[in-house]
Amino acid sequence: MNKPLPPFKYLIAFDAAARLGSFSKASEELSLTQSAISQQLLKLEELLGQSLFFRNGKGVTLTAAGELLYETVRETLSRLSTGIGRIEPYKSSDSVLLACPPDFAQGWLMPRLGKLKLIYPAIEVWIMTEKDVREIDRIDVDLVISRRPIHTEDVECAALLEDHLIAICGVQTAQRIRHFPHPKLLEKAPLLLLESDPTWSGRLSADEVKDLQLTRGATIEDSRILLEAVIHELGIGYVSSALAHLVVKEGKVKVLTQIPTKSLPRLWIMRSNLAPRTPVANDVFNWLLVQAKPI
């Protein structure tokens, strides 16, 4: 038969003491007396039938059993915290969970959210950029914007935005190299490269640039950091027009029209065909489609 689970407060005390290596520090973190922490952990050890800590004058360390339990408790508390976070939007009927690429969120979406708030003052948009959503279950996400459309019977998928790679540089750099034609101007400023795209999607491996003396300014993992490097006059970057949209509009960078653009996969917007978790999700879906229409 399964043993009864320890009281939750014992596991919280155990986690704090194991993580901090001290009963006194655990008591401070949990706003309990050190005696209360000690008693809870003694009762936990009695319940489990084995020692979890080596106690010494300077603090505590975990036994082998304690190490194993700590690993389990940490994983469990982390999953519990994630689960509690997932239900947070459900407190508001005006919340919308939107998953989208980070470049789209930073360059295209953020400048427009103020307009959305004017129409729906109570709306709370949750923007998730770290995971590639391949299905809509109306629990983790209401709307998905992606370059990979979801074509299933339970999902409505609509074309949202055409996107392409553009060459950009800082205002001062543009002033200095603006008269040079492509590809000669590539010699006139350092090139900023993405780790995932070291040839600028083939632009730097073509025959027309093979005899040029190119300078690599930096290789960067995140396109958003690369954009910041361009703004700070560190060289020429080749980025998504969706990402660069705002800084181009604000005049922080200049588009080098001499360098050919390259089409990227279209951005799609998707929602479930079932009744939405919150009615405002459908309003946001339609609003984004209107915003993306060419003027």
Image: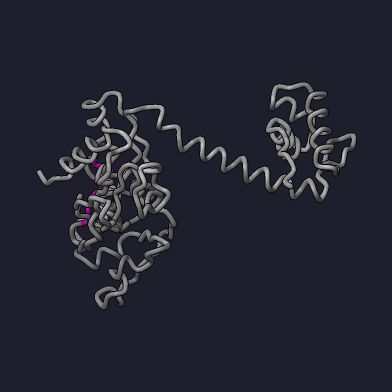
Q: Nearer the viewer, residue 240 or 87?
A: 87
x then y, percent, for residue 105: 32, 44
Residue 288 lies in quadrant = top left
The quadrant of the picture occupied by the C terminus is top left
Asked whether residue 176 appears in the rendered view, the answer is: no
From the viewer's perspective, tell me whether residue 20 is left or right of residue 75. Answer: right
Residue 86 against residue 168 in the figure, above or below: above
Asked whether residue 57 appears in the rendered view, the answer is: yes
Residue at point 19% right, 64% down? Answer: 181
From the viewer's perspective, tell me whether residue 55 is left or right of residue 142. Answer: right
x then y, percent, for residue 82: 52, 40
**Region rendered in magenta:** 251-256
Residue at point 21% right, 61% down? Answer: 261
Residue 155 against residue 5 in the figure, above or below: below
Residue 158 belongs to magenta span: no
x then y, percent, for residue 268: 24, 52
Check the image and name the residue furthest to the front: 1
The image shows a total of numbered marks equal to: 0
Check the image and name the residue furthest to the right: 57
x then y, percent, for residue 260: 20, 64
Residue 55 lies in quadrant = top right
Residue at point 30% right, 70% down? Answer: 202
